Image: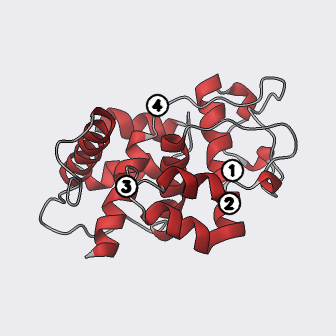
Amino acid sequence: MRIVKLTTVIAAAGLLCLGTPGFAQEDNPYGGGTRLTHNPAEIEYAPGNLNQQDRARVTLGQFARCIIKKQRPMVMKAVQRAPWADDANKALFAIADENCLANGELTIPTSLMRGAVYQELYREKYSAGPPVLVPSRIDFAEGVKEPLDKDIAVDVAMRQFGDCVARRDLYNAHALVMASPGSGAETSAINAL
């Protein structure tokens, strides 16, 4: 049950990251430095043709892949904590690896960092196709102290929304999470949802 719950959270978080801009280093045309072995020319489209938000999402995805590759056990522990747990942000800061940047710094809000890691873990695990979801909806507020503060309430609502979208159209939700930022596949999946 925990794996299925985490899978649904990963799918929901991937949907949440969709249109959210990240901010990266201004003087780098690719939106931030990276020491990843992934050559930008290998991306489906030229990063320079993307808008600032899509370039930032490409950079964030590359950064997430790098930290997963370098620190998988710590990453898994960090994302298994509820975002509202007292030590959740500290755990995310601990997995940020400066060796994944060529130079400068990358400022990432923890919610975007968590979402990018969820999305990359989902892409890794479900590259062949979407998961089978449990039939009943997940109670994302389970274990949260009442009354919910505003940030926690928003987080729970966003997870519920992502779960609802994934349950209504799993295949297009999967296509959206798997699509490259700013690509035709991403636009098609958004339009289908």
Q: Residue at x 52, y 69 (%)?
A: 76
Q: Which residue is mark 1?
A: 63
Q: Which residue is mark 3?
A: 11
Name the residue type under label 1.
Answer: Phe
- Position of 65 relative to 148 (above/below): below
| Marker disc for residue 67 | 2
Q: Residue at x 26, y 45 (%)?
A: 156
Q: Residue at x 35, y 65 (%)?
A: 7
Q: Quadrant of the N terminus?
A: bottom left
* Mark pair 4, 2: CA separation: 22 Å
- Position of 19 relative to 116 (above/below): above
Name the residue type under label 2.
Answer: Ile
Confirm or deny contact between disc 4 and disc 3 (CB under 8 A).
Answer: no
Viewer can see residue 51: no
* Mark pair 1, 3: CA separation: 19 Å
Image location of residue 124, percent across then percent down: 54, 66
- Position of 42 relative to 16 (above/below): below
Q: Residue at x 30, y 41 (%)?
A: 152
Check disc 3: other Cα within 10 Å, few if <14, some if 14-19, many if 20+: many
Would you say 91 lies left or right of 172 here?
right
Mark 3 / mark 2, whichever is N-terminal: 3
Confirm or deny contact between disc 4 and disc 2 (CB under 8 A).
Answer: no
SS for dot 3: helix
Image location of residue 133, percent across then percent down: 24, 67
* Mark pair 2, 1: CA separation: 6 Å
SS for dot 1: helix
